[in-house]
Image (tube, grey):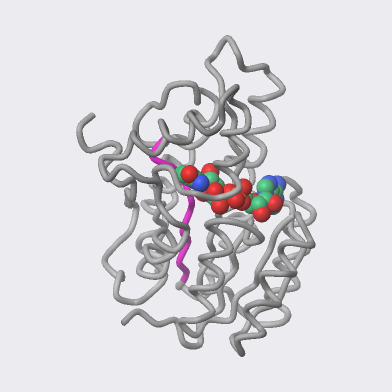
């Protein structure tokens, strides 16, 4: 039902997990997708997979922590397509730990990708969107940006910031034709979660416990998050801005 014909989209961190699913879903819905990631190999693979299906994509190397690289990528995108309709700030990293188990370096690392990264990429595309009075920004926050999650102090801190940035930019530019929303997934089975599980002494036990914390008794699938991104990217969601779209299998329903 939702389609993105003639739309130009860019997804950060699109070489893996949720970002890859969003890039593939958008391309299938008719968008031209700039698949970007700091990991060239996985990003190129996703772009090649999309092109092999006769959908449209191009890989661009993008580390969201570098302002200089963000500016260069924006120049490339705008020179090639003239505009960006949909920006998905998906790149993000995790960390397991309480305040006592978190170092200042951990805080800086998470902040630089999860918060500063969203800022850096939004900042280089917003001027062109404002000029055209049209733009759609989708940020990947987390259920950890809506409720506190045990052992995720640094991660939650950054994801609450993403939710705050989403609402602020949405309000500041609502009258400028710009919509900004965030998606707040619960646990989704991706390499991101596998990496967190590997930090536990018994990863399989931790995996089962993680699945059980959802009311639905399982983790989500990347495609289930991509479906929400497709709705937010489409014109059918024209009245939706500044929202936190929770997709968490009921994780936060009873809290
Ligand atoms: P993932 O680890 O599978 O993929 C993340 C991608 O981001 C990787 O391809 C990685 O190379 C890229 N990346 C990391 N740092 C980058 C940087 N500095 N610049 C550019 N790219 C970078 O992760 P995922 O599970 O697909 O998560 C995607 C987003 O969804 C993240 O923002 C994450 O916080 C959020 N999220 C994930 C879950 C989950 O359970 N998987 C839950 C809630 C929110």
Work out whether residue 213 or residue 132 is closer to the camera in this orientation and state it: 213
What residue do we see at 56% from left, 78% from top? 8
Total marks in image: 0
What residue do we see at 47% from left, 58% from top? 222
In the rendered image, the residue lying farthest to the bottom is 54
Q: Is residue 119 visible?
A: no
Residue 171 appears left or right of 31 = left
Q: Main secondary structure of the magenta part?
A: strand
Work out whether residue 148 or residue 239 is closer to the camera in this orientation and state it: 148
5 to 21, vertically: above or below:
below
Q: Where's the C terminus, which quadrant?
A: top left
User: x, y percentage for residue 106?
Assistant: 67, 25
109 to 132, vertically: above or below:
above
User: x, y percentage for residue 13?
Assistant: 64, 56
Q: Is residue 47 visible?
A: yes
In the rendered image, the residue lying farthest to the top is 100
Looking at the rendering, the stretch of residues picked out in magenta corresponds to 135-144
User: x, y percentage for residue 173?
Assistant: 41, 58
Quarter of the view holding residue 80 = bottom right
């Amino acid at each position: 039902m939702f389609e993105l014909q003639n739309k130009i989209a860019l997804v950060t961190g699109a070489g893996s997990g949720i970002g890859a699913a969003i890039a593939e879903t958008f391309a299938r819905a008719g968008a031209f997708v700039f698949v970007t990631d700091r990991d060239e190999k996985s990003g190129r693979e996703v772009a090649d997979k999309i092109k092999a299906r006769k959908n449209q994509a191009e890989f661009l190397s993008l580390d969201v922590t570098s302002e200089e690289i963000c500016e260069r990528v924006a120049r490339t995108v705008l020179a090639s397509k003239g505009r960006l309709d949909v920006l998905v700030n998906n790149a993000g990293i995790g960390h397991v730990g309480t305040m006592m188990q978190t170092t200042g370096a951990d805080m800086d690392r998470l902040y630089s990708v999860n918060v500063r990264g969203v800022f850096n990429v939004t900042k280089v595309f917003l001027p062109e969107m404002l000029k055209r009075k049209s733009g759609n920004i989708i940020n990947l926050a987390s259920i950890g940006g809506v409720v506190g999650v045990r052992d995720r102090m640094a991660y939650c801190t950054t994801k609450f910031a993403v939710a705050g940035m989403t609402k602020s930019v949405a309000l500041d530019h609502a009258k400028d034709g710009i919509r900004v929303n965030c998606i707040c997934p619960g646990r989704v089975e991706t390499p991101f979660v596998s990496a967190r599980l590997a930090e536990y002494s018994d990863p399989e036990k931790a995996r089962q416990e993680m699945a059980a914390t959802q009311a639905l008794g399982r983790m989500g699938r990347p495609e289930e998050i991509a479906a929400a991104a497709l709705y937010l990217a489409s014109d059918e969601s024209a009245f939706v801005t500044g929202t936190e779209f929770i997709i968490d299998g009921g994780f936060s329903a009873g809290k």
